[in-house]
Amino acid sequence: MTANVPDKPALEGLEGKWDDLWSERGTYRFDRALTRRENVYSIDTPPPTASGSLHIGHVFSYTHTDVIARFQRMRGRSVFYPIGWDDNGLPTERRVQNYYGVRCDPTLPYTADFVPPYEGGDNKSGKAADQKPISRRNFIELCERLTVEDEKQFEALWHRLGLSVDWSQTYRTIADSSMRASQLAFIRNVARGEAYQAQAPTLWDVTFRTAVAQAELEDKDMPGAYHRIAFHGEGENAGNDIFIETTRPELLAACVALVAHPDDERFKPLFGTTVTTPLFGVSVPIVAHHLAQPDKGAGIAMICTFGDLTDVIWWRDLSLPNRAIVGFDGRIISEAPDVITSDAGREAYAQIAGKTIFSAKQAVVDLLRESGELIGDPKPIIHPVKFFEKGDKPLEIVSTRQWYIRNGARDEELRQRLLDMGDDVDWHPAFMKVRYDNWVNGLTGDWLISRQRFFGVPIPVWYPLDGDGNPVFDQPIVADEAALPVDPSSDAAPGYDEDQRNTPGGFVGELDVMDTWATSSLTPQLAGGWERDPELWELVAPYDLRPQGQDIIRTWLFSTMLRSALEDGRTPWKHAALSGFIVDPDRKKMSKSKGNVVTPADVLETHGSDAVRYWAASSRLGTDAAFDSQNPTQIKIGRRLAIKVLNAAKFVYGFELPSGSFGVTHPLDLSMLTQLDEVIIAATAAFESYDHARALEVTETFFWTFCDDYLELVKERAYSASSDAAAKASAVLALQAAIDVLLRLLAPFIPFATEEVWSWTHHSSIHNSVWPTGLTAGEGAAFAPDAAPALPAHSSLLGLAGQALVGVRRAKTDAKASQKTPVASATISGPAAALEELALASEDLKQVGRIETLTFVEGPELAVTEIVLEAGDA
């Protein structure tokens, strides 16, 4: 073997060197002309949100995907590994507002050559009032500008990490091609009756003035208080008060009923009767519903429109009126519900109109205290409150007209179909599937996809205006497929001219955009050329793998499954690989909201990409991993491994192979190759079952045995210039074969160090080489044909010799002698069978231990029982 080995191999600089060469040579390019579907391994890569910076959690999960991609490529699969950027939606808008100090006001005209107030930083504490209002078009231009710059930084980091994606297969969720696919899927949803609009109670974020979907909720424990309030009986119950306890007294004016459990004996006599509300004097019924909780509060609750999601269920199931009083801005609307007719009631309402929720609550409590209808003092509690996952204030529920896609919440046939599709996917780890099942079974409403935002995919519909200029919402004008993509805010409706916009008898464009998940749910289609490149789509779909974080099963995974069910009637992928969370040293999940996020650039620069990849790959799918930036122990271990690969290979390639025809014949060499063959089998099986951490574990464990034991045991024989050329050749051939195999086994994990070493003896990339297949002759065989017939052989010998070597070294250490100290004699005891096998490596043991005479005696366990140093060296 001819090796071109540098004098001082080092990790520094390998990332830039090899990334440039991989790009130049197209090492990871997907060549559709040379493949068929059965040979393709396609990955539905998660598109990171292009709004700021990547964090260490991205490095963690994307490394998991990359090691799988590299393994499949070496197994001979043509890997379709694209990457996209999720660059539309609220996160991008927030970043643009903070970065440029602006906010969007769609009523303003466009300003050419607009210069933002400032550029850079992260003005998170800036108030909206301090941000400069600009037109929608100006705002979208700034979104486009900043996301492009962010994406360049993201791409540079992925290159640094060594992701083996095909950079010719990229997409942006806001690009025209993505808009077309998203709008096309929506139009077909409308045509099949799967997408519809409705005026309905909607979860609403008052900060961002937008609707929020069920999947975007998170509970936060917040302080609150139970207020015990008296409602007044009517009719036969006149003079009797009914007491409820509520955390939302500010919604008394929106009360439409009281509710108790149908089996609650305390309230059965009251069902069908009425009470009047305190302060406002409105008559409301007392009703029964199974969701009422007898052991919560007073056991009877008020139903308001709308305090929480349970109110929505009660309102819908019991056909109650809607008396909503909270506006889109989170304040109490100025006009009181029509049912408040008394002067006292209207006066009380006037005292809360226009107030924020917080101020209105305090005002109502003061009024109740004055009227004597607040019983006792409020009782403080801590309770879960619904928030938009990116919001800072509790959500409200308002009535709005929105677009929805049916998701099985009210369609049992579709729900069951989605559950069955979940059964068709192989989940890694398997226990993650229950999260999908629970989400599908727990759906309470269809998927709300419209958003009252600006930087997103426009909903491709218009509405005709009647003779008075009012929109006819139940007759939407849907875009023609051939015209996509469209923007109804600037493109005229089909069959109309632009001058008919906003005029009686003309049209008005839909201004809402789609939820970002409505586009991200189509990532298989966006990357795979659906309805754009039929040949590519047939090659890659359905995909082999969906890798992602466990926290977005309810959003990205479910929504993709839904869109595939509606459009294709099949699962979008065969496997789902779910990564765990990154937690800080206190085992708290890392997130931007908690302020404990670590950005990866400095970590990669300090320790090297292979070291960071090793840390990530050491964790199994679905398992959380701790990261301590002050003491990244696992990363340091990974760097030590990568350095050892360079140095061990340099050492091995320094041994000269004798001329002539030789093979691997020595028992110790055969033992090492036998164990390595077992490692190949175990690592391959682990990878095929999506357990990359196990593949790394068994490979790394053997690698250190190879370096610490085998290499030490045979180096004297490999160096030897004695007449036993066959013994020397056996060692050199075995060493070279083992390095060749170990490099390939480690290549998915530490691609830079392994590629560097591989290049010393090969002209092609290790990442396009063939995964080792052990003893099997032919392509991919790990060992030379002349060694394979002798294997497996002496499988226990390497372990016995390593154990004996440790004993000899320990004995010298105990004698406070150097390891180079010659030994006059040494005695090793052990079971007869073990000693008989160990004797086959006695010459190697003697050479490495500098032992003149080595004696074996029977004993209960293998141990060095006596060692005599040469005179003058003790």
Image (cartoon, helix red, strand yellow):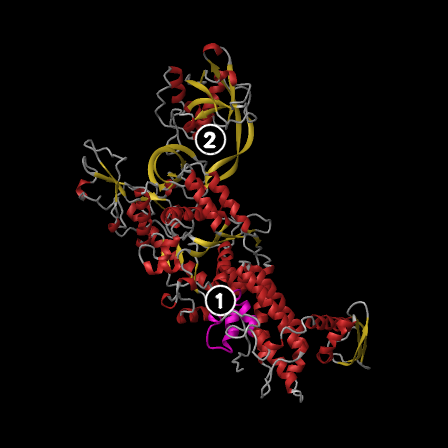
Q: Nearer the viewer, mark 2 or mark 1?
A: 1
Q: Considering the image in quadrants, where does the N terminus appear?
A: bottom right
Name the amino acid, label 1. Answer: Arg
| Residue 634, above or below 376 | below
In the figure, is residue 317 to the left or right of 142?
Answer: right
Name the amino acid, label 2. Answer: Thr
| Residue at point 65%, 83% (across, down) | 727
Q: Residues within 10 Å of mark 2 (few under 14, many from 20)?
A: some
| Residue 687, above or below 371 | below
**Residue 395, quarter of the rendered image:** top left
Residue 661 at x, y = what percent?
Answer: 58, 86
Residue assigned mark 1: 75
Magenta-drawn segment:
740-769
- Main SS, magenta region, reads helix
Q: Considering the image in quadrants, where does the C terminus appear?
A: bottom right
Residue assigned mark 2: 310
Q: Are marks 2 and 1 in contact (CB under 8 Å)?
A: no
